[in-house]
Amino acid sequence: MNSIILATASRYLLMLLLMFSVFLLFRGHNEPGGGFAGGLVAAAAYALYVIANGIDAARSVLRTDPMRIVAAGLATALLSTLPSLLAGKPFMTGIWIDTMSPVGKIGTPLLFDIGVYLLVLGMTLTIIFALAEEDATR
């Protein structure tokens, strides 16, 4: 697409949508949102960028292969299960650490949500980039 308005707006919208996706990620523990919704919003931000600027520009902004993001998400989700096993509790039991800060308690469910966020982002970007590359060859 050759719209200078969309190309310019997509640069700003990318950052805004990525910030909103992180907000959804952290909000999702107690309210609607979470890793899945946040990952989809982040992927939608990149999809808009692909539509406005092309696949090559989007890949350069991302700076990594989406499958590496998938691997990081799977590793993070897997690591979130280890503290409960090491503490001798049932698999995927939430372990919480009180940080004594305004952030409050941080626990393994947040770590699992971050893994889901990365996994959804990486898989969705893999699909979006594959479709965009196929469309570019036509």
Image (cartoon, rainbow, N blue to C red):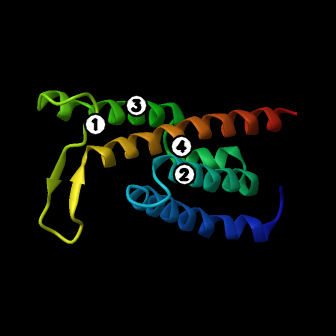
| Residue 122, image x, y percentages | 53, 38
| Residue 105, image x, y percentages | 20, 58
Disc number at residue 121?
4
Circle nearer the viewer, 2 or 4: 2
Question: What amino acid type should be assigned to the residue bearing mark 3?
Answer: Leu
| Residue 29, image x, y percentages | 38, 55
Disc number at residue 41?
none
Circle nearer the viewer, 4 or 1: 1
Disc number at residue 80?
1
Question: What amino acid type should be assigned to the residue bearing mark 4?
Answer: Leu
Circle nearer the viewer, 3 or 2: 2
Left or right: 120 as drawn, with respect to 8? left
Give 112 or 60, whichever is nearer the viewer: 112
- The residue at 62%/52% (across/down) is 46
Left or right: 20 as drawn, with respect to 137? left
Question: What amino acid type should be assigned to the residue bearing mark 2?
Answer: Ala
Q: Which residue is mark 3?
A: 74
